[in-house]
Amino acid sequence: MLVEAEREQSNGGRPRARLRVPAERGVLIGVDVAETYVHVDAFDAALTRLSRHQRDLVDRSEPGYVLGEVADCIREAIVANPRQVLGVGVSMPGQVEPSAGVSVFAPNWRWADVPVQRMLRDLLPVPINVDNPLKATTVAELWFGAGRGVYDLVTVNLGTGVGAGIAFGGELIRGVSNNAGEWGHTTLIMDGRRCRCGRRGCVEAYVGVPGIIATLTEEFPEHRYGGDDQQRFVANVRAGLEAGDPEAGWLIERLSHQLGEALANLVNLLNPERIILTSWTATALGAWLLPPTASRMLAQSIAGSATASQLVVSEIGENPVGLGMATLALEHYLEEVGLPARRGFSARSDG
Amino acid sequence: MLVEAEREQSNGGRPRARLRVPAERGVLIGVDVAETYVHVDAFDAALTRLSRHQRDLVDRSEPGYVLGEVADCIREAIVANPRQVLGVGVSMPGQVEPSAGVSVFAPNWRWADVPVQRMLRDLLPVPINVDNPLKATTVAELWFGAGRGVYDLVTVNLGTGVGAGIAFGGELIRGVSNNAGEWGHTTLIMDGRRCRCGRRGCVEAYVGVPGIIATLTEEFPEHRYGGDDQQRFVANVRAGLEAGDPEAGWLIERLSHQLGEALANLVNLLNPERIILTSWTATALGAWLLPPTASRMLAQSIAGSATASQLVVSEIGENPVGLGMATLALEHYLEEVGLPARRGFSARSDG
Ligand SMILES: [Zn+2]
Ligand SMILES: [Zn+2]
C-alpha cells in the first residue's frame, strides 16, 4: 500500500498534511441521491473522475424502489471500471444517523428511520457509507475547492433547502447525532413566517427558493417570474437582473439583507475564516447577490470576527456531492487500513 | 516529570484519556478580571485550590491601572504559595486575539487593542496566557463540571452579557481569531430591539439581564423589581417567583420562549450532546427557568437533534473562570514540555 504525503501551504502559513493514494490503487464511487435523480460518479484513487452514470427517480416515496435504482446505478459504475472498489459513498437528503446503524430521516421524502446503509449493503458486496449532501459538499470544498488550506470553514447551501457544512481545524464537524449544520432552521425572525420544518421564522423560510418566491410575491403579487418551477424562477430572476428589471433588483436587495444577517450569525457564533456559498442558486445569482450580501454580513459581524471572514462563491463547477462522497469513502478506506487521512470528529457510533 | 493518564468512561461508552499532573509539581494561577473586581485563585498542579486573592477595581477605563492591580494580586498569590509557577491564565472580558500578540478588545471597557499579555509579562516573570471567560468556563465544565465525558458541548453564559463556549470532540473551538461563541450577537428578531453591539434584534438584547429588564418594563411599566442594579433585579424576580407574583411568572414565560428559541438555534446548528447554562442568573432563576426553556428548546429543535441534546444548569458551585484559566495554563504548560493534554484547535498565531 503506497501512500505519499502532500503538504500544502495554508494561507495562514501553517503547512497541512494530506494523504494522496496512487490512482491505480482502485475505484471510489460517489453517489448523489437527489429529489428527481441519482448521479453516480466513479473516480480513481487519486479522485480523478473515470465515468458518470445516472438514473431518474420517478417515485421517491418508496425506499425499496429508490435504493434498488441506486444499487443498479452503482453496479453499472462498477462494471464500467473493473478494479477493486475501495469504497462507495452515498449522499442521501435529510438527516443521516450513524448511531442508528445509519438510518435516514428524510422529511421531504416522507421517509423515517430507513436503514439505508444496511439495505444497500444487502444489495451490493462493497463498503458503503451514507452521509448527507452538506457533509459531502464541505469535504469536497476542503479537499478540492475554496476550502483548501482553510482550517475554519463553513459551506452554505442555497437551494430549495438551506443548510451549512462546518469544519474546524480542517475537520468536518458532525455533532453528536450527525445533524450539525441545520442553519436553515435557525431563527431569522422569532415567530415569523412559517417554515416547512414546523418552526416559524427560520432562515430557510426567507432565503430558501420557496421563501424567495414568497418574498417577491408578497411585495409584487403581479410579478412575472413564475414560481411553480423553482429553477425557472431563479433563471427568470437572473434574466430580470441582466435586463435591469426593478423587481429583480428589489428582490436582491431584500434577499441580501436577510442572507447577510443570517451569515453574520455564522460569523459571530463560529468565527470562520471563509464562508463558501454553494448550489445552483448561488451560481445563478452570485454575481448580483454576493457584493450586497458580503457588505451586510460585514456590517452585522462583531468587530473581531468581521474582517477575519471572507464570503466567496464555490469554484467547484460541477456538482460537488459525488466528489465529496467519494472523498469520504476514501477517508473511510484509509481509516480501515490504518492510515487515517484526517483526525476523528466522526459522529459517535458506539451503540 | 511524572504524568499519569486517567481514563474516564464517557456516557457514550468511549473512554477518554486525560492527563493528570502530580499536585506537588508546582502552582497554577487562574485569574478572573471582571467589571468591578479581580479574583486570583492559586491551585496545585492537580488543580486543587490552595488560596484565593482579590482586588476591587475602582476605574476600569485605564489599562495600566487595571493590569497593575492584576499583577499585584497575582504576585500576592505567588508569594503565598512558594513553589514553581507552572503558568498563569488570565481571563479578560471582551475579545482576546492571540494573532495580534494577545491583545484585548473590550468594548464595554472602552479598551481597544490593548496588548494585555505583553504588558503583564513585562510586570511578571512567569508564563502568562490570556483568554476570555467563555473559553475559561467551557474548559472548567469539560474537566470538572457537567461537560465531563461529553464530546460535543455548549456552555451558555447568561448575565449582563450573553455568550457561548463551544467544544467538539472534547476540544474547545476558538475560530480563526479566537472569537467563536458570540451567540449573544446572533439574531433572534431581525431588525428588532437595538443591542449594545450596534446590531438590532440580537439574542443578548432579549435574554441578557438589561434585555430582561427592558422586556418586563415594556409590559409592566409600574413593576417594582428595580432595574438600575442588575443583581438586585434578578434577586427581586426570584423573590417574586417564590411569592407567586404574576409579573415574575409572566417574565419567566416570556424569557423561556425567547431563550428556548435561541438555544434551539444552537441545537440545530451544532447538534451538541449537552448545553450547560452558567452564571449567576442561571443559578438564581434556574429552578423556574429551566423546565419551560427546555420544553421550548425541544419543540423548536429539528427531529434528529432534539432528543440528542440535554439542557442543564452548571453544577460548578463557585466561579468557574479562575479554575478554567488555571486549567488552560496547565494545558499550555503541558504543551510546552511536549505532553499536550488535548489536541489543538487553538486559534492560529502564525503571524
Ligand atoms: Zn425551519
Ligand atoms: Zn448584539
Image (cartoon, coloured by chain):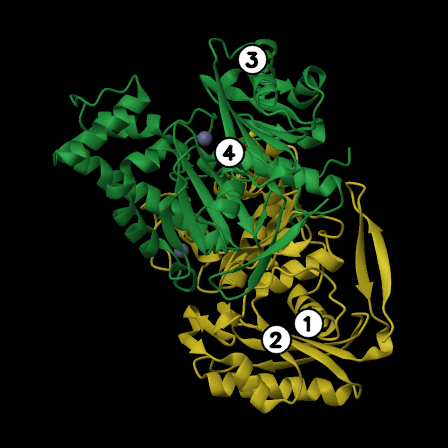
Chain colours: A yellow, B green
When asked about the image quadrant of residue B347, the answer is: top right
Residue indicated by mark 3: B69
Q: Secondary structure at mark 3?
A: helix
- Please, what is the three-letter code of the amino acid marked with disc 2? Asn
Residue at horizontal 23 percent and vertical 19 percent from the top: B226
Q: Which residue is mark 2?
A: A129
- Pinpoint residue A139: horizontal percent, then vertical percent: 67, 61
Q: CA distance from mark 3 to mark 2?
A: 57 Å
Examine the rendered structure and indicate whether residue B62 appears above or below residue B77: above
Given the image, what chain letter belongs to the residue carrying mark 3? B
Read off the residue under disc 4.
B49
Image position, residue B157 (x, y; %): 42, 36
Residue picked out by circle 1: A332
Kindly report the distance in space between the C-alpha atoms of the residues bearing marks 4 and 1: 45 Å
User: Which of these two is toward me, A344 or B261?
Assistant: A344
Q: Nearer the viewer, mark 4 or mark 2?
A: 4
For label 3, count other residues whose C-alpha is less than 10 Å away and answer few (under 14), some (14-19) or many (20+).
some
Quadrant in which ligand 2 is drawn: top left
Mark 3 or 1: the one toward you: 3
**Marks 4 and 1 close (CB-CB < 8 Å):** no
Q: Amino acid at mark 4?
A: Arg
Can residue A112 be seen in this snapshot?
Answer: yes
